[in-house]
């Protein structure tokens, strides 16, 4: 057990230096030996650390330990320590199940040599299947074939474990459009004896009728340089496969509620969006649930429900590439656009 603890600490120290996505994976295995092997079937516990090199391809360092593995036809036992470096390729798709393959090699240390069974170089390869519980936690199972170079033993192994992901993509920062400041037009007085003539501004929004493209704007409504009502936009991002508003975005929801309270002639269309992972039907439902989550939060802030409409756009309107993690994070969003009732 001391060896396991030392290896665990070493793996954790390595991961603190990583800046890309990486995983820590505790694992238990059961190895089945051939009839001519010196060893009985044996179990191991271990831990692995992997770091993503490019999208879908990772490098994985692993340590496994067996305590008192039994020799065939004898009461003798030995401890086995195994160190392996593998290349891992994930077949990423739109479901929570992700198959993967791996291959690599390493060294197996035996502390009690018997019947020419001793420490030696090993090669291994296999395939596995991972199931995502959340964005960062997955369960996995895998099958492995191990070839021991000197004794030519060929073990077949099945393993189970849990994978915990760290680092990687971060939510994109939220930007709020600033209202456009309306420049006041200077009234030029005519010299006497003529009376001063002020430009006409029928709706009194600060933009003269000759330049006003929206001449019937209600009194008191903020307008742009063309005399039309400002559109206040905001955006809230969501975690993968989640519809709950994260606490850090509640301040943005409250700020938008204040804008609507100060401009009672505005209504809002709340649009929900997703990335491309998942079926079209599922993403349409998920985007609608996200839009309703923001709408309900605004209602709790005192906005009349009749002024708010929630719609789900699914994956149909991405703002970034769905091929990258950062792009998918930006596409998991809710946008709200306002206009005059």
Image (spheres, grey):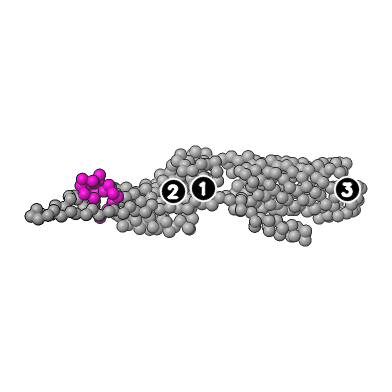
In the image: residue 327, left or right of residue 20: left
Query: Looking at the image, which is closer to me, 205 or 49?
Result: 205
Choose the circle earlier in sequence order: 3 or 2.
Answer: 3
Label 2 SS = strand
Which residue reaches farthest front? 191
Residue 120, image x, y percentages? 84, 47
Alpha carbons under labels 2 and 1: distance apart:
12 Å
Alpha carbons under labels 3 and 2: distance apart:
62 Å
Stretch of the chain drawn in magenta = 207-227
Q: For the residue carrying disc 1, how many other residues have a C-alpha within 10 Å: few (<14), some (14-19), or many (20+)?
A: many
Are the residues at dot 2 and dot 1 in contact (C-beta closer than 8 Å)? no
Q: Residue at x 55, y 46 (%)?
A: 325
Residue 5, image x, y percentages? 74, 60
Q: Residue at x 64, y 57 (%)?
A: 16
In the image: residue 87, left or right of residue 242: right
Decide: is 264 above or below 89: below
In the rendered structure, find residue 117 and report the number of the disc placed on it.
3
Residue 24, image x, y percentages? 66, 53
Q: For the residue carrying disc 3, how many other residues have a C-alpha within 10 Å: few (<14), some (14-19), or many (20+)?
A: some
Label 3 SS = loop
Q: Residue at x 91, y 47 (%)?
A: 116
Choose the circle earlier in sequence order: 2 or 1.
Answer: 1
Location of residue 18 by image quarter: bottom right
Q: Residue at x 48, y 58 (%)?
A: 247
In the rendered structure, find residue 329 and report the number of the disc placed on it.
1
Residue 173, image x, y percentages? 47, 53
Residue at the spot of label 2: 334
Asked if residue 128 shows in the view, the reply is: no
Choose the circle earlier in sequence order: 1 or 3.
Answer: 3
Which residue reaches farthest left? 193
Q: Check residue 221 for magenta coloring.
A: yes
Alpha carbons under labels 1 and 3: distance apart:
52 Å
């Amino acid at each position: 057990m001391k060896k396991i603890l030392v290896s665990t600490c070493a793996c954790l120290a390595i991961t603190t230096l990583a800046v890309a996505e990486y995983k820590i994976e505790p694992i238990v295995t059961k190895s089945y030996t051939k009839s001519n092997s010196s060893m009985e079937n044996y179990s191991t516990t271990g831990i692995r650390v992997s770091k993503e090199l490019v999208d879908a391809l990772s490098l994985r360092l692993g340590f496994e330990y067996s305590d008192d593995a039994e020799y065939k036809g004898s009461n003798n036992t030995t401890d086995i320590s195994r160190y392996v470096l593998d290349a891992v390729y994930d077949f990423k798709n739109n479901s929570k199940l992700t198959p993967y393959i791996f291959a690599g090699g390493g060294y197996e240390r035996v502390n009690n040599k018997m019947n020419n069974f001793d420490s030696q170089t090993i090669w291994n390869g296999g395939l596995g299947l991972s199931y995502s519980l959340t964005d960062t936690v997955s369960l996995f199972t895998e099958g492995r074939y191990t070839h021991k170079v000197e004794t030519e033993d060929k073990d077949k192994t099945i393993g189970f474990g849990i994978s915990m992901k760290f680092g990687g993509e971060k939510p994109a920062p939220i930007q709020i459009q600033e209202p456009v400041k309306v420049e006041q037009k200077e009234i030029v007085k005519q010299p006497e004896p003529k009376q001063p003539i002020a430009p006409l501004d029928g709706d009194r929004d600060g933009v003269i009728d000759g330049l006003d493209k929206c001449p019937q704007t209600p009194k008191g409504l903020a307008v742009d340089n063309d005399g039309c009502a400002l559109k206040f936009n905001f955006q809230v991002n969501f975690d993968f496969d989640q519809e709950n508003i994260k606490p850090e975005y509640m301040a943005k929801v409250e700020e938008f509620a204040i804008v609507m309270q100060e401009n009672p002639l505005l209504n809002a269309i709340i649009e929900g969006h997703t990335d491309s992972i998942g079926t079209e039907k599922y993403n349409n439902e998920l985007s609608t649930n996200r839009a309703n989550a923001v709408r309900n939060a605004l209602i709790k802030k005192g906005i009349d429900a009749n002024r708010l409409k929630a719609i789900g756009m699914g994956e149909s309107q991405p703002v970034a590439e769905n091929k990258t993690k950062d792009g998918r994070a930006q596409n998991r969003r809710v946008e709200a656009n306002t206009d005059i009732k």
